[in-house]
Amino acid sequence: MRYIFTIAINDIRVYIQDTGNLFNLFVVPVILALVLGFAFGGGSQLQYIRVDVVDLDNTAASTQLLTELRQVNPSLVLCPFDTVEDFSCNLNADDPTLTVSDALTRVEDDQTAAAIVIPAGYEQSLLNIEPIQIEYYSQEISQTDVVLQALQTAIQPVNGEVIATWVSIGVAQALNAIQDESILTSTAYDIARSKWAVDNIQVVYQTASGTSGITGNGFNQSVPGMATMYVLITAFGGMIVLLQERKQWTFQRLVVLPVSRAHLLGGKILARFLLGLITFTVLIIVGVFTGVSFGNDPLAIALIILSYTLCVTALSFAFAPLLRSEEQASSVTLLLSLSLAALGGAWWPLEIVPDFMRVISNISPVAWAMNGFSEVLFYNGGVVDVMLYVATMLIASLVFFIIGIMTFKYE
């Protein structure tokens, strides 16, 4: 391992001695992140999202549900109940009430991001432990729907209360017939498990025509976007360096040194991997100063960064043996970096592109990373929520490394 680190540190030292590389590493990505962040409505101020609520029950239980919804996502303005300075619900001042028809029309006309309908008898159904359906309308139902995510989170504690009620009832009934404490514990567990399988409150999704106008902190998009793109550029730049070293016979001289070829290749790979992590570190610092919310699970962010950087490093070494000249490597670096970045959502959110483009975006590791960042930055997700993306990038890394190692030419 000592030889691997020695080679990697030497490559990094050579890299940073070039002022042009330093400029590309510390200045350009920061400038682009700031420009795009402000272009997407940046700044750390809270961006409000208008949501229409038709409460047909109008009870303490329905009011409590709306309170839970506000706590989950403070950026939601629930019309006509909420009043926010400099942000209007755009309702008739003389009659601000909403009907289901009014709310659906406002969603279709893009006047509001979504509409939620709490049915009449909501509280009584809770007390009777009866199934409840909450209607939800938006332009498009997707996993990245901010309002839908908040609503689903808000109803979770209510469903938990229902399960606790079932358990209490079951245990109380069992007390008359069962005195053994272990059997009572088993009975309570069985009741909870059976009721947890079916949520008492369910959200019924319905779509309406129109396009979404939801916005958020622009730096939540630009900071990870520019980081993923410049890690691509840094990793693919390693292909150019390898060709330069072969041309100057530097690499051939390294091959005859008393170090294994595995150590030599490992050092080259580690150098690009560490440079990629430096790029992410720089952009994360920018994110901290621009008000990016990195969620409550630093481990999830770390896993995305490490797996993505490893993946694009492996991808660059899989391509390296196919190239024959520095000019060819420069062209491929530019083409792949810009194409994969744009395709994967580094420049703009994937939510605004057509459905077929979202499908195609899955060929880009940038999309896997950006989807992971979206889960954490926008929806307060954790390790479990990003594991699919992390696992995908790790598997891709393994495949790319196998291809690169098998085809790499040392001479």
Image: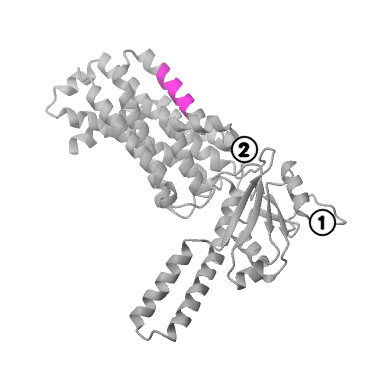
Mark closer to the observer (2, 1): 1
The residue sitting at the right extreme is 94
Residue at 35% from the left image edge and 34% from the top image edge: 311
- State whether residue 86 appears in this view: no
Magenta span contains residue 336: yes
Secondary structure mostly seen in the magenta stretch? helix
Q: Mark 1 — residue?
A: 96
Where disc 1 sits, the SS reads loop
Label 1 is placed on what type of residue?
Answer: Pro
Q: Quadrant of residue 22?
A: top left
In the rendered image, which quarter contains the N terminus?
top left
- Residue 252 placement, left or right of 354: left
Q: Is residue 131 above or below residue 385?
A: below
Q: Mark 2 — residue?
A: 40
- Residue 333 placement, left or right of 287: left
Residue at 44% from the left image edge and 52% from the top image edge: 382
Label 2 is placed on what type of residue?
Answer: Phe
Residue span colored magenta: 331-340
Mark carried by residue 289: none
The x, y position of residue 340, in whole percent, is: 46, 27
Indicate the colouring scheme: one colour
The x, y position of residue 71, in whole percent, is: 60, 61
In the rendered image, which quarter contains the C terminus?
top left
Residue at 58% from the left image edge and 54% from the top image edge: 150
Q: Could you say which is closer to the camera, residue 243 or residue 179?
A: 179
Q: Is residue 298 above or below residue 312?
A: below
Where disc 2 sits, the SS reads loop
